[in-house]
Amino acid sequence: MSSHLAKSARTDRGVLLLYWLASALFVAYLCIAVALPVVPVFVTARLGYGNGWAGAAVGIAFASTILTRGMAGRIADAQGSRRCMVLGLLAYSVAGLVCGGAGWPGWSAPAAYAVLLAGRLLLGLGESLATVGLIAWCFGVTGPQRSGLVFAVVGMALYAALAAGSPAGVALFEWVGFAGTMAVCAILPLVALVMVLPVAAVPVVSGERLPFWRIVSRIWQPGMALTLQGVGYAAIGSFMTLMFLSRGWPYAGLGLTCFGGAFVLVRVLAGSLPDRVGSIPVALASMAVEGMGQFLLWQAPNPAVALAGAVLTGLGCSLMFPAMGREVVRRTPAHLRGTAAGGLAMFQDLALGATGPVTGVIADRLGYGTVFLAGGLAAGLSLLVVISIARGDPRPAA
C-alpha cells in the first residue's frame, strides 16, 4: 500500500510540474505571438516594402524552426532537456533585442530589414530549443506512460499563447511602438526562465546517439499522418475568412473562433485520452471527424453549416498530435525521445508551412471551397496511414 501511495504521489507531482513548465512555455511563447501581427506592419509601413517582403520576414522564423528541430533534439538528448529549454529561452530574449534593434532610426531600410531577418532567424532557433527541450523535460518528470498528456498540455500552452498574444501585440504596437513591443518580447522569456530555473533537471539517459534522419525513418508514419492532418487546420486559418467574404456571408471572423474553441475544449476535457485508450483508436476517430468537417466546409450552402464544419475540424485536429506523439514515444528508446519529438514537430511545421502556398494555387484556380475538399482528402489519407500503423504495430522500443 505504501509503495502504491508513493508512486501515486510521484505521478501527481510529475503532472503538476508538467502544468508548471507548460505555463512557463506559454509566457515565453507570447514573444512569438506578440510579434506576429507587428512584424508585417513594421516592414510595410515603416520600411516601405511590399507584402511579399513582410511575409518573408514572418516566414523565415518558421523556416529556421524546421531546420533546427534535429539539432534541438540532439541537445536535449545528449546535454539535457533542461539545458535545451534554457538555451531556447535565452535565444528568444536575444532575438527580441535584435528585432527591436531594427527599429533604430539610423538604419537604412535594407539594413533594418537585414537586422530584422537576423532576429527572426534567432527566434526560430529559440522556438526549436524551447519547445523540444520542454517536451523532453516533461517526459522525464511524468514518465513515458503520460506522453499523450504531455503533447496535449504543451500544445494547449502554444495555442493559448497565440490566441492571447496577437491582440496584445496590436495593442502594444499602438501604445509603445515597434521597439517597445520588441522589448516586451525580450522580457517575457526571462520571466519564463525565472519560472523554470527552480525545477530540477532530469538525468540524461545514456545510449547510442543516432543521426537525426535515422530517427526520422523510425517515425515517418506518425509524422506523415500528422502532416496530412495539418492540411485542414491550415486551410481554415488561411482561407475560411476569404471564403465567407467572397460569398457575402456574415460572421467571417468566427471560423477560427469555432475551430479554436472546439480544439481547446477537447484538449481540456480529453487530453489524456490517448494514454487511456491508445493512440490508434484516438487517431482513427480524430481523422474521421476532421474529414467530415472539411467535407462540410466544401459543400457548405450557408454560414451555419460552414461554422459547423470548422467545429468538427477542431474536434478532429485536437488530439491527433498527442496521439501520434504517444506513438512516436512508444517506438523510440528513452535516450532518443527528445530528437524524436523534434522530428515529429518538424512534420507538423512542414504541414503548416507548405499548405498555404499549395492550397492558394488551388483556390485561385478552382475556388475557395475546393481547398476544403483537399483538406478532407488529406484527412482520408491520414486515416489510411494510421490504419497502416495499426497493421504494422511495431513493438515498443527498449
Image (spheres, rainbow, N blue to C red):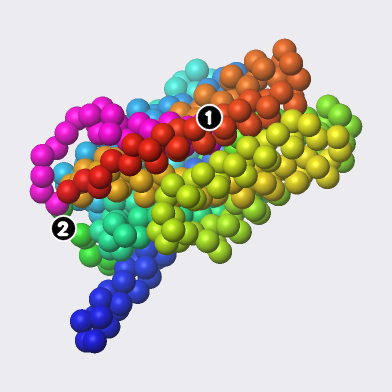
Q: Residue most toward the front?
A: 391
As displayed, is residue 376 above or below residue 282?
Answer: above
Residue at which label 1 appears: 381
- Pinpoint residue 322: horizontal percent, then vertical percent: 44, 50
- Pinpoint residue 318: horizontal percent, then vertical percent: 55, 49
Q: Amino acid at mark 1?
A: Leu
Where's the N terminus, which quadrant? bottom left
The Cα atoms of the two marked residues, 2 and 1, are separated by: 39 Å
Which residue is rendered at x = 25% and y = 76% of the image? 7
In the rendered image, residue 218 lying in the magenta stretch gets the answer: yes
Range of residues picked out in magenta: 205-229
Q: Nearer the viewer, residue 262 or 21?
A: 262
Q: Secondary structure at mark 1?
A: helix
As displayed, is residue 3 above or below residue 86?
Answer: below
Which residue is rendered at x = 62% and y = 44% of the image? 289
Residue at which label 2 appears: 203
